[in-house]
């Protein structure tokens, strides 16, 4: 199976939401909350926020954060592209190897650089969408807007390649019920990660990126990387470390596959 359902976090969220709703209703009727009730409200808020920042908890719906185990496969995934220089650097590093990756592209960048999107597809890699643009407030958008923007991004990829993406990684990875409902309406599956390098942050050092990634390079891992900067104003640290990362995969007997390989099943 691609995704496992973490029942405990979701059950805790449902239970705490019910408690919080009761307390808020009593407050509206003129019953001021006591310390215990305030603690419950704080706990509900903390748990809700945790579900936004850690999508692998699947608190608001099914999210794929790992692949099948026992195959010696991982999925290297790249966000925030395409970019004519840095994305092509990633493609060059992958060329001539057995490794394939997944690129979660932004719709507006795909419209600016359709030739790069075609190169990704022609090289045998998988394509998903990362939104129509990098909206940092995406998780607060109405499901109708989420669906509309996902369909626009998907159409941009389809025009460039003839491929209609089915997978979506939200900007920043933040996931709320609004995000889940919107993606569901667009007929798309949300993909998270099991290992990340924070390589998309300005100032990230290659040695730190490698140190963060090394423990997570295990069978079935989905690895979050970046093939471009959010605003195209610097080179992500993943670019210089990618040859070393591919060498580590070879040493461990792991092969990176495009997510289409797993979802196609």
Image (cartoon, rainbow, N blue to C red):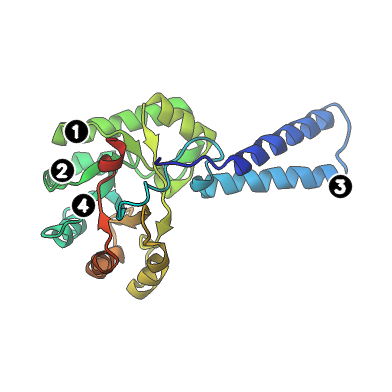
Q: Which residue is mark 2?
A: 121
Instruction: Give the label on residue 241, or none.
Output: none
Instruction: Decide which of tag 3 and tag 2 comes sooner along the chain.
Output: 3
Residue nearer the viewer, 243 or 221? 221
Instruction: Decide which of tag 4 and tag 1 comes sooner along the chain.
Output: 4
| Residue 203 visible in image | no
Which is closer to the viewer, label 1 or label 3?
1
Q: Which residue is mark 4?
A: 100
Q: Position of residue 195 (x, y in %)?
A: 41, 58
Taking the spot 22% from the left edge, 49% from the top edge, the residue there is 82
User: Could you give the CA–CA distance between mark 4 and mark 2, rounded to whole angstroms?
Assistant: 11 Å
Which is closer to the viewer, label 4 or label 3?
4
**Residue farthest toward the front in the current orientation of the protein:** 70
User: Could you give the CA–CA distance between mark 4 and mark 1, rounded to whole angstroms?
Assistant: 17 Å
- Tags 1 and 2 in contact by the CB under 8 Å rule? yes
| Badge 1: residue crowd in 10 Å (few <14, some 14–19, many ≥20) | some
Q: Which residue is mark 3?
A: 35
Q: Quadrant of the N terminus?
A: top left
The quarter of the picture where residue 51 lies is top right
Q: Position of residue 93 (x, y in %)?
A: 17, 62
Instruction: Decide which of tag 4 and tag 2 comes sooner along the chain.
Output: 4
Left or right: residue 66 compared with residue 23: left
User: Could you give the CA–CA distance between mark 1 and mark 2, rounded to whole angstroms?
Assistant: 8 Å
Which is closer to the viewer, label 4 or label 1?
4
Residue nearer the viewer, 6 or 92? 6
Left or right: residue 71 compared with residue 39: left
């Amino acid at each position: 199976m691609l995704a496992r359902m973490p029942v405990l976090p979701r059950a805790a969220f449902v239970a705490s939401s019910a408690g919080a709703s009761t307390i808020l209703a009593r407050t509206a009727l003129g019953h001021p909350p006591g310390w215990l009730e305030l603690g419950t409200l704080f706990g509900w808020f903390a748990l809700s926020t945790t579900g936004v920042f850690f999508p692998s908890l699947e608190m608001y719906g099914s999210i794929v954060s790992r692949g099948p185990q026992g195959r010696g496969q991982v999925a290297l995934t790249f966000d925030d592209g395409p970019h004519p220089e840095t994305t092509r650097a990633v493609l060059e590093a992958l060329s001539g190897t057995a490794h394939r990756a997944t690129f979660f592209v932004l719709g507006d960048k795909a419209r600016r650089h359709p030739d790069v999107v075609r190169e990704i597809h022609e090289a045998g890699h998988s394509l998903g969408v990362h939104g129509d643009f990098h909206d940092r407030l995406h998780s607060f958008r109405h499901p109708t807007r989420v669906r509309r923007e996902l369909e626009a991004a998907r159409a941009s990829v389809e025009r460039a390649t003839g491929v209609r993406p089915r997978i979506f990684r939200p900007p920043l990875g933040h996931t709320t019920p609004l995000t889940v409902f919107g993606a569901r309406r667009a007929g798309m599956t949300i993909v998270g990660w099991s290992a990340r390098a924070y390589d998309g942050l300005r100032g990230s050092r290659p040695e730190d990126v490698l140190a963060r990634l090394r423990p997570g390079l295990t069978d079935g891992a989905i690895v979050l990387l970046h093939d471009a900067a959010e605003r195209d104003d610097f080179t992500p640290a993943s670019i210089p470390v990618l040859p070393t990362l591919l060498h580590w995969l070879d040493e461990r007997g792991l092969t990176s596959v495009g997510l289409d390989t797993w979802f196609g099943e």
